[in-house]
Image: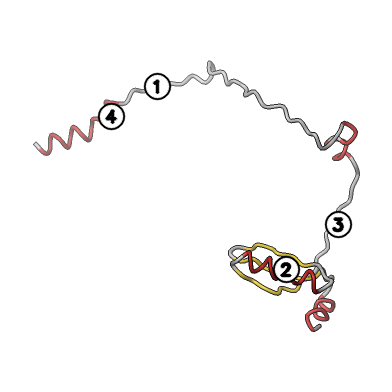
Amino acid sequence: MNKLVFLILLYDPLFAQEIQVIDHKIIKDIQPNWPVIINNVLDDSTSFEFVLSLDSVQSVLEGYRVQVLATRYIERADSLAAIMKNTISDSVYVDFEAPNYKVRVGDFIDRDQRKHCSKS
């Protein structure tokens, strides 16, 4: 009896399936109706095409920053950054690099400038 039930359960999915053949030549894909995007920020004289057509150069410099704090809590990082912005003249940054928020100071081009800042 158990063998019969096992055989029925084993071969039943084979006979329960119906084979369907899809003819890709007759299927028509309907194009979606995309919404119209209205840009209220740029007028016609400063359209995206015009802005992209401008010849602009972007330079990227490598540099150094002094890391002051690494914490998992954004409140601590933001409060220290606010205190440091009022205390020092250099730029203060709060970056998230999983899993920590890092408070970094300065925009230094070389290590000598960075070392001078970290000593003072």
Name the side, left or right, on which 66 lies relative to 33.
right
Using the image as rendered, state which of residue 120 and residue 8 is in the foreground: 120
Residue 12: image quadrant is top left
Marks 4 and 1, the one that precedes in the sequence: 4
Q: Residue at x 68, y 65 (%)?
A: 78
Name the side, left or right, on which 99 lies relative to 65.
left
Quadrant for the C terminus in the image: bottom right
**Alpha-carbon span between mark 1 and mark 2:** 64 Å
**Alpha-carbon span between mark 4 and mark 3:** 64 Å
| Residue underneath mark 3 | 59
Q: Residue at x 42, y 21 (%)?
A: 21
- Neighbour tally class for label 1: few under 14, some 14-19, many 20 plus, Cα within 10 Å: few
Residue 14 numbered mark, or none: 4
Q: Residue at x 86, y 33 (%)?
A: 43
Q: Secondary structure at mark 1?
A: loop
* Marks 2 & 4, CB-CB < 8 Å contact: no
Marks 1 and 3, the one that precedes in the sequence: 1
Marks 2 and 4, the one that precedes in the sequence: 4
List x then y, in percent, for residue 94. 71, 64
Residue 80 numbered mark, or none: none
Q: Amino acid at mark 3?
A: Ser
The extreme left residue here reads 1
Marks 4 and 3, the one that precedes in the sequence: 4
Q: Amino acid at mark 4?
A: Leu
| Residue underneath mark 2 | 81
Residue 112: image quadrant is bottom right
Count of marks overlaid on the render: 4
| Residue underneath mark 1 | 20
Q: Amino acid at mark 2?
A: Ala
**Alpha-carbon span between mark 2 and mark 4:** 67 Å
Numbered disc in front, either 2 or 4: 2
